[in-house]
């Protein structure tokens, strides 16, 4: 066998090298942009760094000749929140509905998925044409919203399928058996159990909308979202303000992901912590009564699974 | 709502698409009794339970509880509560909130519902686990939580879907006694679905043996075990040897039959007298068989009835008795359960030539198709279930 002296096969080194390349490709450009965004006031678009400053971040907000950063950023955030809300609500409803094999379920499913396969630019073009035909002027909150939903809804639906496939319907039946109305079953049992998956859908809805480009390009109307504004800037802004913008938007994405992951972790931790705190109380209580807290525990635990 | 947990199924049929799950079943379960629906998987027992619970609607027929039709009513209005297989405890709620769920759904205030749930948990010695999540409990504890959650609704009928299958052997034996005790204490009707013969006859007043959507026999545990109605029940419950053949004579309250190998058996005939030439089957309980060791192999049995000659295939010591399996040429294996003390006086060994004998008065006549065997080719012997209980 071709083994090196310390016992690792040559494939280990080949794959390690490949992985290193992958990481360089992934983070190299991002790091370059991140570093260059702190370029000194007299520096240019390329290395070397000419001092270190926050000059280009200030230039962004000052809205000199670097485009409508504040406006497009707030539009993008608003749009992403609207898309998130609609995607979550419709995906949950569709997930619930698709558990029944209703007439035409397959056709509806493929129609929903088709917009994932269709080239985004063409889809955006279609939306734009439709609005023009109807003599409605396109805007970020109407035509662009619709175009983005064609992208986020199928994703949300697919995630909800995965979430529901692991959901045991006995929970719903148990709730019904215990006298819960359909609404109570949904609010008290189904949605809380599915909450981590729902947060996942929300996260997808937000980030897909926040950096959506091809579908939004044509039906956006007169006021750009952030990705479109960045695109416009790359053609006429020739200062490191562009990099500052990249650093800021990346930071926003990370914040959103962190918020989502933290909220999932907090939900799970809170459930566990509540248990731990109360168990401590129970143990304190049992110390008083002299009954060990595990006294009722079954002698064998192999049936726990 | 009537308080009686008297259940009546009238010609109930259930179809799923084209599959017939329950085929025209009529059954009466008296108020305050413990009924076990017993059968192999896919026999329709769980479907019946779910129809009584209101989680499935019958395709045809009527279901009555306490004399009133409950078809179309939601579970709560039926006065039933169900304990689900694997319990279906809500994973996001504490034990206390699980037990209090019914009260929450009814709009009872938080303080009161927690107070009442604590009382119920105290009855099953789980009060100190009230704030735990279900996943942090052992199987036996989860089962008691599920029981408490169902019983807080004060049902007149408790429906249990394989309540013991998620437990290990030790807990299973402990909990089945516990279930029986709780049923007695509450005085309500329990309907318990199981595929384990021993579990059914250990707890039930009424055992309903099912096969392919029909009831093979509904009777007391003792009757099901010692006086099976059909060859299927005899084989499924174990404890019996099934004998089949053609009637050659009927006289003096007994019929004599001869099977394909020429062996002759006699069976008492009671109300139903078979005609000469008719194919019938009967059974002899394994512990009513005597086994005698032979000096010379393969003796000529001639025209003797209720005698089979063969060689010992297996010997299994079972504590109070010894199970002796005998290979008989040309027919299915014959089993004799010999009392342990008698076996020790005249022991047998594998390969010994033996004859098995039994008295005609201990033979029991069966009705129906003698060839129908429980699914899984070999009839599940009762003894095997003691250690070979099914795992998920």
Image (cartoon, helix red, strand yellow):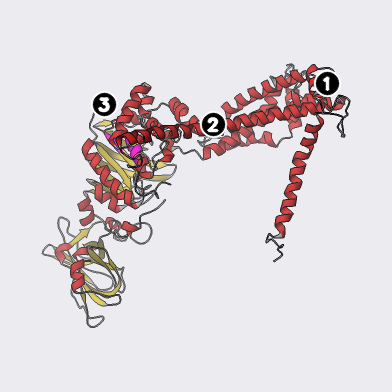
Kindly give the residue lying farthest to the bottom in the view shown.
B296
Asked whether the residues under marks 2 and 1 belong to the same chain, the reply is: yes
**Looking at the image, is mark 3 or mark 1 nearer the viewer?**
1
**Residue at screen point 77% across, 35% down:** A30
**Number of numbered markers:** 3
Which residue corresponds to mark 3?
B1
Which residue corresponds to mark 2?
A266
Q: Nearer the viewer, residue B203 or B55?
A: B203
Q: Secondary structure at mark 3?
A: loop
Chain for disc number 1: A
Q: Label 3 vs label 1: CA separation?
A: 76 Å
Which residue corresponds to mark 1?
A66
The quadrant of the picture occupied by the N terminus of chain B is top left
Q: Position of residue A77 (x, y in %)?
A: 68, 22
Asked whether the residues under marks 3 and 2 belong to the same chain, the reply is: no
Q: Which mark is residue A10?
A: none
Pointer 2 or 1: first along the chain: 1
């Amino acid at each position: 066998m071709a083994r090196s002296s310390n016992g690792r096969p040559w494939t280990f080194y080949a794959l390690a090298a490949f992985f290193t390349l992958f990481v360089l490709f992934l983070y190299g450009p991002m790091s370059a942009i991140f570093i260059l965004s702190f370029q000194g006031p007299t520096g240019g678009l390329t290395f070397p760094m000419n001092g270190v400053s926050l000059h280009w971040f200030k230039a962004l907000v000052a809205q000199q000749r670097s485009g409508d950063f504040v406006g497009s950023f707030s539009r993008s955030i608003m749009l992403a929140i609207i898309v998130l809300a609609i995607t979550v609500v419709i995906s949950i409803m569709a997930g619930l509905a698709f558990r029944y094999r209703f007439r035409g379920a397959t056709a509806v499913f493929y129609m929903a998925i088709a917009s994932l396969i269709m080239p985004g630019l063409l889809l955006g073009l279609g939306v734009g044409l439709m609005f023009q035909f109807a003599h409605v002027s396109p805007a970020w909150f109407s035509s662009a919203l619709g175009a983005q939903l064609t992208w986020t809804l199928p994703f949300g639906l697919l995630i909800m399928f995965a979430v529901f496939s692991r959901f045991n319907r006995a929970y719903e039946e148990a709730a019904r058996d215990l006298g819960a109305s359909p609404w109570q079953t949904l609010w008290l049992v189904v949605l809380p159990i599915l909450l981590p998956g729902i947060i996942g859908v929300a996260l997808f809805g937000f980030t897909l909308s926040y950096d959506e480009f091809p579908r939004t390009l044509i039906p956006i109307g007169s006021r750009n979202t952030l990705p479109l504004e960045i695109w416009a800037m790359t053609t006429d802004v020739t200062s490191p303000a562009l990099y500052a913008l990249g650093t800021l938007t990346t930071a926003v994405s990370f914040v959103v992901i962190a918020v989502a992951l933290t909220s999932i972790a907090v939900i799970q931790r809170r459930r566990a912590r509540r248990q731990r705190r109360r168990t401590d109380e129970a143990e304190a209580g049992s110390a008083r009564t002299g009954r060990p807290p595990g006294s009722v525990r079954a002698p064998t635990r192999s049936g726990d699974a | 709502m009537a308080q009686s947990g008297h259940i009546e199924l009238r010609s109930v049929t259930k179809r799923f698409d084209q599959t017939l799950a329950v085929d025209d079943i009529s059954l009466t379960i008296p108020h305050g009794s413990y009924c076990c629906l017993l059968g192999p998987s896919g026999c329709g027992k769980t479907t019946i339970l779910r129809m009584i619970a209101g989680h499935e609607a019958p395709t045809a027929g009527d279901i009555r509880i306490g004399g009133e039709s409950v078809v179309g009513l939601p579970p709560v209005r039926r006065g039933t509560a169900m304990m689900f297989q694997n319990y279906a405890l809500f994973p996001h709620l504490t034990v206390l909130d699980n037990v209090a769920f019914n009260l929450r759904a009814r709009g009872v205030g938080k303080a009161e519902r927690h107070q009442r749930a604590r009382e119920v948990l105290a009855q099953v010695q789980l009060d100190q686990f009230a704030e735990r999540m279900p996943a942090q409990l052992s199987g036996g504890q989860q089962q008691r939580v599920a029981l408490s959650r169902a019983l807080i609704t004060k049902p007149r009928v408790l429906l249990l879907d394989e309540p013991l299958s998620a437990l290990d052997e030790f807990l299973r034996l402990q909990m089945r006694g516990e279930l029986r005790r709780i049923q007695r204490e509450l005085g309500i009707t329990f309907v318990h679905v199981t595929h384990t013969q021993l579990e059914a006859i250990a707890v039930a007043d009424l055992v309903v043996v099912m096969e392919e959507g029909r009831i093979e026999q509904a009777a007391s545990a003792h009757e099901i075990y010692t006086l099976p109605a059909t060859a299927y029940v005899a084989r499924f419950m174990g404890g019996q040897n099934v004998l089949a053949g053609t009637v050659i004579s009927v006289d003096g309250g007994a019929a004599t039959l001869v099977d394909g190998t020429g062996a002759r058996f006699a069976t008492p005939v009671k109300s139903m007298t078979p005609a000469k030439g008719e194919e019938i089957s009967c059974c002899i309980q394994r512990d009513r068989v005597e086994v005698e060791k032979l000096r010379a192999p393969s003796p000529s049995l001639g025209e003797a009835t209720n005698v089979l000659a063969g060689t010992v295939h297996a010997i299994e010591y079972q504590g109070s008795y010894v199970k002796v399996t005998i290979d008989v040429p040309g027919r299915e294996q014959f089993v004799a359960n010999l009392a342990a003390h008698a076996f020790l006086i005249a022991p047998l060994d594998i390969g010994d030539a033996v004859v098995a004998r039994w008295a005609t008065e201990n033979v029991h006549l069966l009705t129906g198709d003698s060839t129908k065997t429980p699914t899984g080719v070999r009839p599940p012997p009762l003894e095997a279930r003691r250690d070979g209980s099914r795992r998920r």
